Image (cartoon, rainbow, N blue to C red):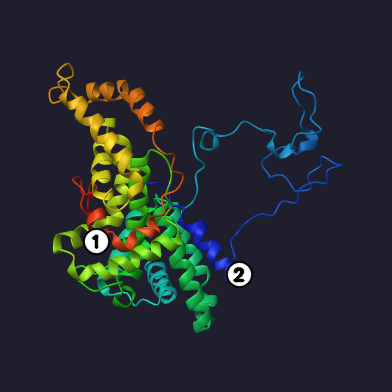
Amino acid sequence: MKPSSINPGIIAILCATSLAIATPAMTVTPPPKSTPTIKTTPPAKFTPLTKFTPPTKITPPTNATPANTPISTPSPSTSTNNQPLVAVTTLTPAILKNFTNLYGQVLAVKFTPSQQQKIQQRLRREWIVNLGLRNTVSQTIALEPQILRGTPAERSQLQAKLVGNLRQQVLDGDTDALWLVSFYDASPKNWLAPGQPPLTRMTSDISADALCFMVNEVMGRSVATPDSKLKNSIATKLTTEYPSIPANTKQVLSRLPAAWLTFKDNEWFRRGDDFREQMRIHWGKNLEAYIPEIREISKLRRDRFAKLKADPNIQWDRINSIQRQAALQKSDLDFRRSVRTLAQIKTVPLNNYINTMQVANAIGNSPTRYFRPKVK
């Protein structure tokens, strides 16, 4: 799991609500520009700067920052090849219970025994290795007095900002944020539409991200962005479509948030050019009926691929992935020349087409099923 970026986002939200957060830190006052002297007291084990004699060939620096000057040989635990050893707070039952209660209060969610167990299992499993989760827990607990004294309006404001931030962190690829916001989405009062499984806002937001990704890949450049207007439009459209969506498509959509993160951040880059081009062709065929701007380039991609597969000198079905990649690269120059003959499109106004688009089919109908991640 990649390092979590949740904690800074959560802290920024909480600070925005004028809630003071007490975190241990050392404030260092920078020296006046006219004097290179630092007034902070050096650590006890280091030799004072006044007794430091620089090497013969180095002029004592007046513009350098003395705090960055090595005073003694660093120990192996603080060398550039080793991270400093940091004491990790013990995860006690009291910490687990306090965090679960406080987090539930912020989200206005009463965790079920099963959810409490999942939270505790996850924290126990990742407590030592996941700094982001540890910081999230400690900062949440530090806010206990403010959370308990907050008015309903203040809690509602904090909840909206926290959930919104978590959703954005998910779109940025943060699986920890997805785990945290999933408890909020699991509450029936937060569903977009009931069903087996229900439709959640995280699914619709990821659908917006996936749709823009598909269009940009088909076009070969960035022409669509999952802004708030598009996300709201897709949420409304999916909510309307959901009662008539087939059961298997609902299952695919319910797994989309976790599966899409794995697909976009891992599988998309690990697979070869052959796979990526076939996906662009598949997406183009699905979307060109609704989005006229992609029709011409979508056809170019299909024609190029059909020509490669039909070339007897290539024997596409018999060659391996490396040879296919070489064949695609060889045809790339001609393909780019053809693309330059098309009208240059800077933006694709997806909002104009959402009402006529079958969003669930376009997002959920993929031959890869977006590589459902392993269940932990």
CA gap, disc 1 and disc 2: 37 Å
**Residue drawn 33% across and 49% down?**
292
Q: Nearer the viewer, mark 1 or mark 2?
A: 1
Q: Is residue 9 above or below residue 162?
A: above
Report crowding for label 2: few under 14, some 14 to 19, many 20 or more residues within 10 A (C-alpha).
Answer: few
Residue hosting label 1: 254
Q: Nearer the viewer, residue 228 or 37?
A: 228
Determine whether, in the image, residue 88 is placed left or right of residue 251: right
- What is the x, y in percent for residue 290? 29, 53
User: Going 50% across and 80% down the picture, which residue do you hit?
Assistant: 148
| In the displayed structure image, the side of residue 25 where residue 101 appears, left or right | left
Amino acid type shown at disc 1? Ser
Q: Quadrant of residue 351?
A: bottom left
Residue 92, x across and y down, in percent: 39, 65
Q: Tell me where residue 269 appears, x and y as whole percent.
A: 33, 37
| Residue placed most toward the observer, 203 or 290 | 290
**Residue 28, x across and y down, in percent:** 71, 51
Residue under numbered circle 2: 20
Kindly tell me whether residue 126 is visible in this rendering. yes
Judge whether 156 appears above or below 222 on screen.
below
Q: Residue at x 35, y 54 (%)?
A: 126
Q: In the image shown, does 326 or 296 lie closer to the viewer? A: 296
Q: Of the residues under marks 1 and 2, which one precedes in the sequence?
A: 2
What residue type is disc 2 on?
A: Ala
At mark 2, the secondary structure is loop
Q: Residue furthest top?
A: 313
Circle 1 Cα neighbour tier, 10 Å, few/some/many (<14 / 14–19 / ≥20) = many
